[in-house]
Image (cartoon, rainbow, N blue to C red):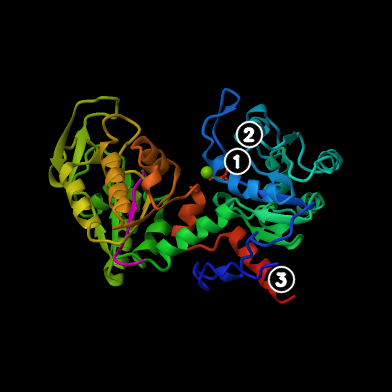
Amino acid sequence: MNESSGALDKGAAGGIDLSRIRTIDGVDVDGKRVLVRVDFNVPIEGGAVADATRITRVLPTIAKLAGQGAKVVVLSHLGRPKGVPTPETSLRPVAAKMQELLPGTNVHFIPTSIGDEAKRGIDALKPGDVAVLENLRYHKGEENNDKDFAKALAALGDIYVNDAFSSAHRAHASVEAIVDLLPAYAGLLMMAEITALSRALEMPERPVMAIVGGAKVSTKIEALTNLVTRMDQLVVGGGMATTFLLAQGKEVGTSLCEPDFVATAKEIKALADRSGCEIVLPIDEVVAMKLEENAESWICPVDEVPADAMILDAGPQSLANLKRRLAGVRTVLWNGPLGAFETKPFGEGTLALAREVARLTREGRLLSVAGGGDTVRALNDAGVAADITYVSTAGGAFLEWLGGHDLPAVLALSRSGARAACG
Ligand code: 3PG
Ligand code: MG
C-alpha cells in the first residue's frame, strides 16, 4: 500500500500535513468491501435528481474501485433530516441516477444504513457491484460524530475511502469517527479538491487575487480576514461590497447591507493595509428602485447612488477595472456573485466576469479556482465552467478552507495516514 500521495507539500493547509493523506492508488481492493463516503447532497425535484454534478464528479473513484473488483458501498447524507426519515431526503432517487450514469455496473439501493439488513445487502454484492445505503442523517449518531454509529458503519466494510470534500467541514461520524476504525484513504475527487485549493490558496503563483461576492459580510468574515493576509488583491463584490462602501461613508440607498458589520469591514480593510493586500471595491453600479425581473435600471458611480435606489450589480467601469486587474494576475480564487445574479438583468456583471476569467484561463494566462453553489451556477449559466482550471463541488467546505480552517475530515485522513506510516 502507498504511504502518501506525494502530490502535496507538507503543511499546505494550515496545521494539516496533507502529504500524510493516503490515496487509493495501489490499494488492493479486490473482493473487499469498500465504504466510499461521497457527498450526494444534491437537489431533488419531483422525486428525481435535478443536478447530478456531485454524482458525476465521484464516478471516477467509484468506477476505479469497482473495476478493481471491490464491492463498493456508497455512504452519504442528503438534506438535513435530523434523525427523522422523510420521503424528500431518501437516497433512492440518487441510486437510480447513479445506475443511469453507470450502465455497465449493478447499482443497488439498500433502504437502511446500518445493521443486519444493510449487512445482508452488502454480503449479496459481487465484486464490481455498487450499493448505495440510505441517508446517514436518518441516524442522530451521524451528526453527533457518535463512536457507536461509526462502529456500526465500519462493521459493513474492510476499507474506507472519503471522496466527500464538500462535507469535509463537518465533524460527523462517517467522515471523522470512522476514520479511526478502518484503513482510510482519500478518493480521487477529494485529492483533486485539496490539491487545487492548496495550489491556489497556500502556494499560488503570484500575483494572486481573490474575488469574494455574495450577499453578506457576516457569513464570510473569516474567509475575508484570512484572504487579506494571503492575497495580493481582494475584490469584494455583491451585497457585501455595499457594507464596505458604507464603511467609507458612502450613500448606499436601500441596498442590501449590514450596518452592524461596518466595524468588521473597517477591521478587514485595516488588516489588508497592514498585509499589503489591496481591497478592490466597485467604481460604478447598476441600480434600480426594486429587485424585480426586468425592473428599470440605470448605471451610476458609487458616489451618486440615490437614497431611494438599490445597488443590484457591478457597473461597466467596475467590470473594466476587474478585467484590467485580472490581466495582471496569475491566480484567481472566486466565491460569490457580483450582484443579484438570479434576477435579470442583474446577473450581467457576474456573467461577464465569468466569461473573462474563463477566457484568460483558456489562453493559459490564469489559473482559476471557483467554488460555491451560486458561483458554479453563474459559470454554468455563462457556459464556461469547463474553461475554469478547477471548479470545486464544495460550498461550505470551500469557504471554511478559504477561512484558513483545518477541515475535520481532511485532518482525520492525515492523522490516519500518519498512524499507518508509523506502523
Ligand atoms: C453541502 O451541501 O455543502 C454539504 O453537503 C454539507 O451539507 P450541510 O450544510 O447540510 O452539512
Ligand atoms: Mg450547505
Residue 129 in the image: state x and y as whole percent. 74, 41
Left or right: 40 as drawn, with respect to 386: right
Q: Amino acid at mark 2?
A: Val
Q: Is residue 78 above or below residue 65?
A: above
Residue 87 in the image: state x and y as whole percent. 67, 27
Q: Which residue is mark 2?
A: 94
Q: Amino acid at mark 3?
A: Ala
Q: Which residue is mark 1?
A: 40
Q: Which residue is mark 3?
A: 420
Q: Quadrant of ligand 1?
A: top right
In magenta segment, residue 208: yes
Left or right: 103 as drawn, with respect to 280: right
Left or right: 403 as drawn, with respect to 33: left
Q: Which residue does the image show at 54% across and 50% down from the upper left?
A: 166
Secondary structure under the numbered disc 2 in the rendered image: helix
Q: Counting residues from the N terminus, which is met first, the one under dot 3 or under dot 2?
A: 2
Question: Which region is colored magenta?
Answer: 205-214
